[in-house]
Image: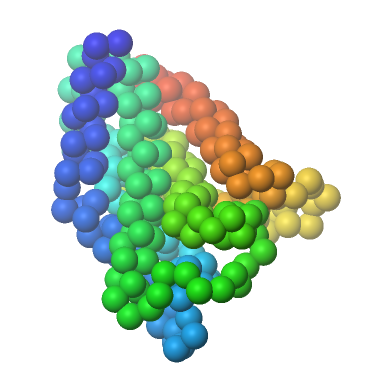
Amino acid sequence: MKTLFSLLVISFKRAILSTRFLASVCGVTLVLFLTSFGMINPLSDVLSVVKTTGGGNMILVVGILPLIPFATTFASEWEEGSASFWLVRSGVRNYAVSKVVVSAFSGTLTTFAGILLYALILLIKLPFFSTITTGDAYAPLLEAGMPVRYLLYSAAHLSLSSALFAVAALWISTYIPNRFTALAAPTVLYFALYRLTRFWDLPLYLNLGTIIEGTYHAGSPQATILFKLGTVTILCLLMGYGIVGQIRRRLQND
């Protein structure tokens, strides 16, 4: 446990206290700005603009930029030959668990911080909230007079999708330890699976588009965010199990 804690501390510092993290957060903000610039009008408020951003560039916000701070580090370490240094001293399980946890957290935080930074920038010119323009699962928070909580819940909901992409990048990199493949492959995999499954008669909460980009209404804002968190956690655990096994096989065959 002490070894795992030390690895987590080191990895969090590498992920969060880095120029890559700062650049990725600013990148998310820039993508949101470029996507929504033409939609802003005198009647807009911050929440309505942030809610309508993303569009065709959503995959950049949740699936590519959040991978840069940490999710490709296994591929980099394996390419450089430094992975064995950490694996010998920490063990496969501790090493893999630390990679999964920090990849998921840094991916989520990148998108979340980028969205909040964009909201703060919009506050320079726009009011924070004026009228309700959405009927999504978190709209009851607006009806209850809690627009700040609405922003936090909505941003967290979307940001959790970045955790899936980050862990998927790590999982793929254990099979193909190349940092560019790790960065691009999760997006390719997502679009391939989405096209394959979009005509399947699946429940809404199992629909890949809903899991990644949409919102499943679980009955209340609190239940909705917990449902998203639970879904992401289960999928990350499944990929994490595969990551441990594949790293162990790589060491045995190396």
Q: In which image quadrant can residue 228 be found?
A: top right
Quarter of the figure with the N terminus: top left
Q: Residue furthest right?
A: 201
Q: Is residue 3 left or right of residue 119?
A: left
Q: Is residue 39 above or below residue 22?
A: below
In the image, what residue occupies the spot 42% across and 70% down?
128
Position above or below: 59 against 17: below
Camera-side residue of 142 and 2: 142
Q: Residue at x 37, y 17 (%)?
A: 93
**Relative side of 4 to 234, left or right:** left
Which residue is at the front of the view, 179 or 45? Answer: 45
Viewer-nearest residue: 248 or 23: 23
The foreground one among 181 and 170 is 170
Position of 66 compared to 236: left or right?
left
Q: Position of residue 142 (x, y in %)?
A: 57, 60
What coloring was used for the rendering? rainbow
Determine whether, in the image, residue 204 is placed left or right of residue 173: right
Residue 122 visible from this viewpoint: yes
Residue 103 on image: x %, y %:
35, 39
Q: Residue at x 63, y 55 (%)?
A: 140
Residue 66 in sight: no
Residue 160 in the image: above or below residue 198: above
Name the quadrant of the C terminus: top left
Quadrant housing residue 220: top right
